Each structure stands twice: as C-alpha cells, then as structure tokens.
Image (cartoon, grey):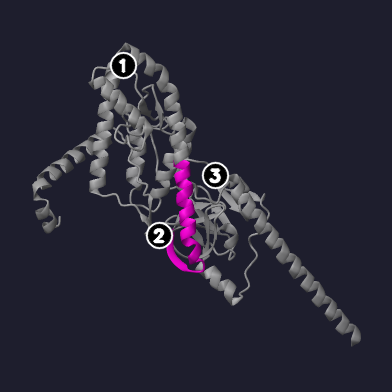
Amino acid sequence: GDKDLRDNYSSVVADIEDMKKLSDLLTAQRIAEGSLDFDLPEPQIIIDIEGNIEDIVRSERNDAHRLIEEFMLAANKAVAVEFSSRDLPFIYRVHAEPNPEKVLGFREFIAGFGYSMKTVRSGKGSPKEFQAVLAEAEGKPEAKLINHVLLRSMMRAEYSPENTGHFGLAFTDYTHFTSPIRRYPDLIVHRLLKKFLKKEYGPAEQEFFRKWLPATAEKSSEMEKNATDAEREIVNMKKAQFMRDKIGLEFDGFISSVTSFGIFIELIEYFVEGLIHMTSLTDDYYIHDEKAHRLIGERTKRIFRIGDPIRVVVEGVDMERRRIEMSLVEEKKSRKKGKSVKKSQKTNLKSVKKEAGKTRTKAPDSTQGSNSNPASNPAVGPDKSSDKNFAKSSKKSSAKKSIKGTTKDRWSGKKKRKKKAKK
C-alpha cells in the first residue's frame, strides 16, 4: 500500500495485516460451506450542506468493508451458537429454503444465458449450486440481473425464536448482534447476553422471554420490511429529483434489463436507471425474445440485449411513479429532422403472440406490471397499475394523432374534387 500511510500507522499495520489474513480464512471457509455472497452494489447519494443532491454513485465495497463484514458475521454466529447450544429462549435471524417453484423458475431463467444447475430436479437447490452460478456470472454483463433474480427467488430472511438455520449464509445458527444502536432485535440479543453473562437468566426469566419473544420477533420482521420499502422509495425519489434538471441531456449507458414493455438503461456517469418504453422504439416492430433476454427488430433484425452500450436522452421524469423516462438519441434526432417513421408499434395491448418461445409485443404489456426495473426491485413485486396507466396515455395520444391525420386527408381530398369540378 501507500508507504507514507503505512509509516503514519506503523503501530497497527502488523495487526491489520493479521486481521486481513484471518478475514480471508473466514471467507474461504464460509464459501466452502456454500454461503451466498450477492454482488449488488447500492447507490450512494451525495448531498451538499444545503441538502441538495450533488451526485449519485455506486457505494464502495473494498477490503476494509469485507474485513469488517466477515468479523460481524463471525460475532453474530458465535452469539447464536452460545444460546442454541444451551437451548435458551433467544431471537434468531433465520432464512428458509427457497420455494421449489421459484428455484425451477430461476433455473429456466439462467438457461437463457447458457448457465445450468445440473443437480436441481424437484426444485430443491443447495447454496453451493447457487453459489456456482454467481461465480460463473461474475464480471459478465448479465451478472447484476442474475444476482437480483436469484435474490428475488429466495425467501425473505426474518426474526424468529425458533432456530431453523440460515440458508443463504449456510449457517445452522445465526442472529443479529452487532448493531444494537439501529436494530431492535440486536438490542434484545444484547440484553439476553448480559443476563446470561451475569447469571440472571434463570427459569423465571426464561419463561417470560419464551412467551414474549414470538410476537416481538414477528413485529421486528414486519417493521424491517416497512423500513426496507421506505428506504427504496426514498432512494428512487432522490434519483428522480436528481434527474429533473437533466431532461434533454444525452448520456452514455448500457442495457441492464430487457422486458416485454421496454429496456432499462443504467447510466455510466451516474448510478441511475431509466426506461426506454417500447412505444419509444419507433424504427421497427420489436419482438421480445424472453428466453434470450433481448428485443429483435422484425424488419431490421436489430437486437437490444443486456450489456449492450447505448446512448440515450432523458425525456422526462415522473415524480409520482419515481420513474425516469429515456429514449434513444438516434430516435430523438430522427423526430427532429422530421423523417417518416414506420408505424410498427400499434397500441393494441392484448396482441401478444408467441413464436418459438418468443413474446411478440407491439406495445406495453399490462400483464408485466410496473415500469420499474424488476431486477432492481428484489423485495417487492411489480406495480401493475403503472404500466397500464402509461399504456392508456400512449393509446390516447396515438388515437388523437390518427384522427388528425384522417381529417386532414379528407379535407385535402375535398379540395382536389372541387378543383376538378371547376375545370
């Protein structure tokens, strides 16, 4: 590392290096047992002294972060083992095995990228199998999407007085102990541990907590979900606010997800995603190849696939839906020059045809739900109202255009007939 930095902290350098070696050993042991390590970067919102958003970047996760995380996992596990081995009333952090149907769905999903889970038969998959898929996808364009879809295939971790183990970490005993200043279950664990160490956790206390912990664990799980949803809403709102003054500007990005109602673009300059709706792709009639996760132009054979670099312009920001709307720069220039564009995407929402596993889409599919990227929303399902409303507005605007065009044609036809009559 930096020589000056090492010199300034020479008294602790040796200890930190030993900590790093120990952290690496713990990580290797955990991975060998099948623990899942999701690579899901989170947005870091940079705010100035007046509360204005200056930037949105990927949050950093370096060796220092990993070292602390590994020691926190070890501490949480050690406390859980202590109580579990003594069969004392306690609050655990548990994570159940995934639903077999979702496991089979995930296997089918990754098959579109060329991955497989050979030992999965009846929908039961081990952590090691999922871990192997994540390792194989690491560094590839589809890695982020696969991480998100796998996370959504998992059950939600929760608090419970019953120790059923933690599937994702591949731990038989686990709890939340390290953050008592921000999580109530951790505070409960600290109180129980103090009672145990002071030899105050006798039969009467155990009986009290045996009755009290179930409802407390359930309420803690409920409040955690509410907090997670609120945090996601705030982040999406801040992203939308940040992009409001950038309407009309062009950015480089890449395709992060492909759906039947459009493509999601992650910008390179800012850690922000936006949607290019299917109705904005006016140069061709696009087919959604669901298995290969791409859109294919029927006439031009143009393909949009995950990871493709792309240049976009910010068209608008819908604060109510927390959505950033984008379009291709070339489409924008085409409209400005007044070029004729083939009307290949009609607004008949129900016309969805399937050919060899491909979904043929002419307009936003209301059955797909929200315009929020499903890959970026692992904890909640799609909002079915969002895409319907967008589709309705698109249908109305298309109808108005066609009525105007028809009236104009009729009027010009009358003029021609009058001229002929005069002659």
**Residue 401 shown left or right of residue 338 in the figure:** right
Residue type, mark 2 in image: Glu
* Circle nearer the N terminus (3, 2): 2
Label 3 secondary element: loop
Q: Are marks 2 and 1 in contact (CB under 8 Å)?
A: no
Q: In this view, does 167 lie above or below 44?
A: above
Could one spot residue 258 in this view of the protein?
yes
Q: What residue type is labelled 1?
A: Asp
Nearer to us: label 3 or label 2: 2
Tell me if mark 1 has few (under 14), some (14-19) or many (20+) residues whose alpha carbon lies within 10 angstroms of its own. few
Give me the C-alpha separation between circle 2 and circle 1. 52 Å
Residue at (59% x, 72% y) in the render? 335
Q: In this view, does 76 lie above or below 299?
A: above
Name the residue carrying label 1: 87
Give the residue at x 37% y 32%.
Answer: 184
Q: Circle 2 sits in a helix, a strand or a loop, which is it?
A: loop
Judged from the image, the secondary structure of the residue bearing numbered disc 1 is loop
Q: Label 3, on which residue?
A: 382
Q: Distance between the residues labelled 1 and 3?
A: 41 Å
Q: Nearer the viewer, residue 98 or 63?
A: 63
SS assignment for the magenta stretch, majority: helix
Q: In this view, does 10 lie above or below 405?
A: above
Q: How many labels were placed on the picture?
A: 3
> Can you give x and y, in whole percent of width and height, for residue 379 in the image?
47, 40
Contact between marks 1 and 3 (CB within 8 A): the answer is no
Question: Outermost residue, front direction?
Answer: 50
Residue 232 x, y percent position in the rendering: 46, 46
The residue at which mark 2 appears reads as 50
